[in-house]
Amino acid sequence: MTDARFEIAAGFLPLLDSALLVAAREKGFAADEGVALNLVRETSWANVRDRLAVGHFQVAHMLAPMPIACNLGLTPLAATTIVPMALGLGGNAVTVSNALWARMAAHGATDDLAPRAAGDALRAVVAEKAGGGQPPLRFAVVHPHSGHNYELRYWLAACGIDPDRKAEIVIVPPPLMADALGSGALDGFCAGEPWNTAAVMLGHGQIATVKAKIWRSSPEKVLGADARWAEANDDALAALLRAVYRSAQWCAEPANHQELAAILAAPAYVGRPAEWMRPALSGRMHIGPDATVDVQDFFVPQAKAATFPWKSHALWFYSQMVRWGQVGHSAGNTAVARETYRPDLYRAALKPLGVALPGANAKVEGALAATTPVGSAGASLTLGPDGFFDGSLFDPDELDGYIAAQGQDRNG
Amino acid sequence: MTAKPLAVLVIDENRIRASIIEAGLREAGHEDVTLVHDVSGIAKRIAEVNPDVIVIDLENPNRDMLENMFQLSRAVKRPIAMFVDRSDSASIEAAVDAGVSAYIVDGLKRERVKPILDMAVSRFNAFARLTRELEEARSELENRKVIDRAKGILMKSRGLSEADAYALLRKTAMNQNRKLAEIAQSLVTAAGLLGDDA
């Protein structure tokens, strides 16, 4: 690729949703846009953040709340990071140990991934353990500023389990989750794929519920970009966004899933068997030794504006940071969260492609009970369904009220 | 004003590199150095050691867990990233380039801590150089072995002298614009397939 106009280094972690960046390189979408895309696999999100800050990376595969946390000063050594694009919707699951699943099943959990039934059963197990003087259940997530942490906590809290007082939540790197579950170090975890499938395939656990059922069509990973670089290199960034959008279209095509799984399985990327990648791509999840469930919208790479950086997503993550005591609520912090996501850059870059671009920057989350056409430019666009499992709504214009209400929840 | 000696905790799964760092710290007069190779039970260790400075390699996948623990922990003094002072970007870059990171207890004067990080950076770089040289030496040795085997095959199957066998391998490598060791490896592989291994 000697004729590349732009050289961009991107950090990523070995996860299924690195697919959009990986395919952008491997299927030539980056080269078509004149981008020499150098992908560097990393071992921790802290490394991704540090290497973005010192300029080793210009962009990175990041947990959607991470750039917000960086800009709020919640992490060490963070460059100002913007989010010009999301890298798909959904993709996570909550997996519990075989022992915990057996106890949950005894309390009515069924192998259909229904979050309410699983949560009610879990609450019964939590009460049983507390009554027996046993230590609380230990769950792991991959990072404190992650969709995993917030959706696990949301699910537990909505099912009447205070995640701080009635459970323990620790941090474990995703590739180590399955072993930690198998060894009994964890009772459960919330992580991306292929690590839930891995735990099931290795016989260490059962998938209890999934992100797509806790909050359907919800944000997960984003493309984080060093703000200084993005400002000085807007052409390069726009070219990359177009390449990743093309890649998302390719990744979304079922006919390509076999090939995509094989690409991701390569040692340089996820480095695990291709059959571990397929369930998330098809939505046909193996959730336990004898159960397979077809999950609608398990992972959405492109449809439903899956790559659009909604400011309402940023603000929901911010509301959860406030809820769990990571940051104080203020007008200033709200503005930082809102301005981290940059739909303006997304629109400017993709306009030449003539694809569907949402007309709004934010939406009421959880409002769509069915697939719904929405205002767009370029091509027609449908969104949803996007419900939270407990039926609640997040209106970004009513942020203060939402934050106040979840505080009361917690004290109640 | 004599300051209390700093307690340094080195977290590195690579035992050799950890020892090299430890030796450097001790040479620099830091007596209170603890090495940890395995992060299981790390919270307890940190509470026991109560370190002022924590040095950790960037390959360690548990950095996210550690940073989270530092933020939440009430049992230990609160360590923060070495790199809060962004004005010293050269030393930050040097550390990330070398593959090392450090956390210090909030409030420590950076003049006291910077030499520790500088030392860790230079020892990390030295270790990387050593590893690279060892790797080169190892592959050099491997190459020599495979060339010797290829020569043996040619001598046996074509009745060549050792010098002629070597000359033939060299000429073939030059004609094909490949490395001598690659040609030798191809020959050894082919001979193995033909059941004609010398």
Image (cartoon, rainbow, N blue to C red):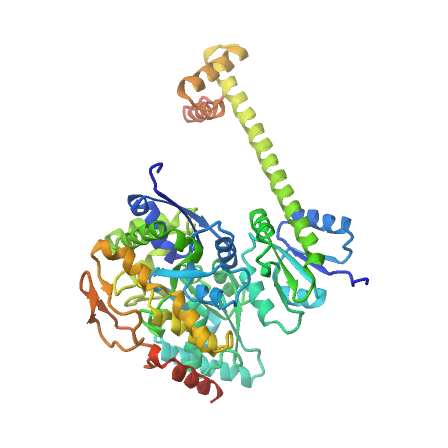
**Residue occupying the point 42% across, 24% down:** B190
- In percent of width and height, residue A40 lies at 45, 48
Q: Quadrant of residue B175?
A: top left
- Is residue B78 among what the camera can see? yes
Q: Is residue A6 left or right of residue A130?
A: left
- In percent of width and height, residue A153 lies at 45, 75
- In percent of width and height, residue A289 lies at 38, 65
- Is residue A320 among what the camera can see? no
Q: Name, please, the residue furthest toward the right.
A: B1
How many circles with numbers are drawn on the protein?
0
Q: Is residue B62 left or right of residue A210?
A: right
- In percent of width and height, residue A15 lies at 41, 57
Camera-nearest residue between A192 and A115:
A192
**Residue occupying the point 39% across, 82% down:** A402
Vertical placement of residue A184 versus A103, above or below: above
Which part of the image, by quadrant, shows the N terminus of chain A?
A: top left
Vertical placement of residue A283 versus A407, above or below: above
Camera-nearest residue between A258 and A389:
A389
**Residue occupying the point 58% across, 63% down:** B66
